Image (cartoon, grey):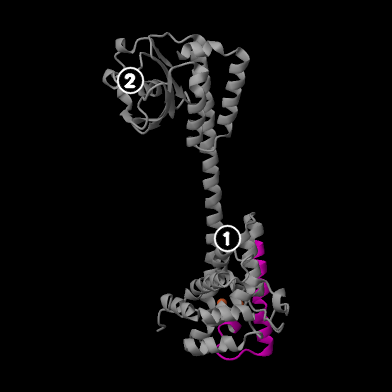
Amino acid sequence: MGALAFDHHSLEDRSSALGNLTLQLSMARGIDEILAVVRSHARRLIGSDGITFVLRDGEKCHYAEEDAISPLWKGQRFPLETCISGWTMLNRQVVVIEDIYRDDRIPHDAYRPTFVKSLAMAPVRQDDPVAAIGAYWGSNHRPTPAQIQMLVHIANSAAVAFTNVTLVSSLIAAREEAIRAKEAIILAMASLAETRDNDTGNHLIRTQHYVRALAEACVERGLFAGELTPTTIDLLFKSAPLHDIGKVGIPDSILLKPGKLTAEEYDTMKTHAELGRQAIATAERHLGCCTPFFGMAQTIALTHHEKWDGTGYPHGLKGAEIPLAGRLMAIADVYDALVSERVYKKALSHGDAVDRIVAESGRHFDPDLTDAFHEIADTFHDIHQRFADAPTA
Ligand SMILES: [Fe+2]
Ligand SMILES: [Fe+2]
């Protein structure tokens, strides 16, 4: 019998086993782990024939886990009022029953198919029980004070573990929420910048889809496979809409000018790359967080006007000196500009735009990327159709 097995363990064995259980519970990362730790240690520590771990699930008790000489109620749910684990949780106290058939808090029908004759049950988190742990014996047995103390100790360790798990998951949720909020603020800034020079916001959405399609096409062709991991491609997708955020710093007289810019105006216009990088860096500093998203967004804002042959701006970087993100963005941005109508120009057809980009291979654009673009140009066309601008009045 379990009760005898208990007596065979020396005091040191028991206290080190209990220490081990407490340690494992303190490291549990989820309710499943808490259940598993209790399931694998509690019965032997208490010296019972069975244990159950019952979770409170609204107005029901859920027999979530058990370890017993023969099956109990694992997986079943009972109303709190009709079972003894419910009684323990509702009354926030330990219950000890030497003969279950002489106690009318016990639903005898549920017990008849089982071996159980005696039990002890303790709430997990006494001030606001979230669960209960039960110990069962197959013969009429009055649990010893040491056994009850052990049961209560395990229930209290489980309570600490529950609190930890709840805290950690709410911290994680809060952190993810904060990151999402930060990204949303930045995207809102980006679309404000966009609406100033282009009254349709779809350019941002299209460029993020182009960039992702082009990056995925590269990976399929074995290009930049080490650099373009799924995480990086996702970052490219998320940060592409920020490429022109620096335009918030460009005066309307230049941004909205229908005709050709003067050399001086064009120099001002070029500053949007560095202004964009600064805006994102400032946002990152103020928001007090540093995620790869902000780094990628800065790179794209700063380098999307660099050219492969070194004639671009702001730094005249050449070839592979230009970060891959900037090289990808250049194709996405130029394609969309060519096939879209702007105040100062008509739209080109898809075919003409493709020819124009291919002709710039090795001059404006990275030749490898231009080849990949050429092969998947239809996808660019589809994206442009799918997120078409509403016709302007
Ligand atoms: Fe730009
Ligand atoms: Fe753009």
Residue at image location 43% in from the left, 17% down from the top: 49
Q: Give the prevailing secondary structure in the magenta stretch.
A: helix
Could you tell me residue 108's position as x and y percent?
28, 17
In the picture, the quarter occupied by the N terminus is top left
Residue at image location 42% in from the left, 8% down from the top: 142
In-image side of 313 versus 183 (left or right): right
Say which residue label 1 marks.
Answer: 231
Secondary structure beneath disc 2? loop
Tell me: residue 317, above or below residue 88. Answer: below
Nearer-the-camera pick, 188 or 41: 41
In-image side of 277 versus 356 (left or right): right
In the picture, the quarter occupied by the C terminus is bottom left
- The amino acid beneath tag 2 is Thr
- The amino acid beneath tag 1 is Thr
Residue 176 visible somewhere in the drawing: yes
Tell me: residue 133, above or below residue 298. Answer: above
Say which residue label 2 marks.
Answer: 114
Could you tell me residue 389's position as x and y percent?
43, 79
- Magenta part of the chain: 254-282
**Residue 170 is a magenta residue:** no
Residue 131 marker: none
Task: Indicate which disc, 1 or 2, sits on the residue closer to the N terminus.
Answer: 2
Distance (Cα) linking label 1 and label 2:
52 Å
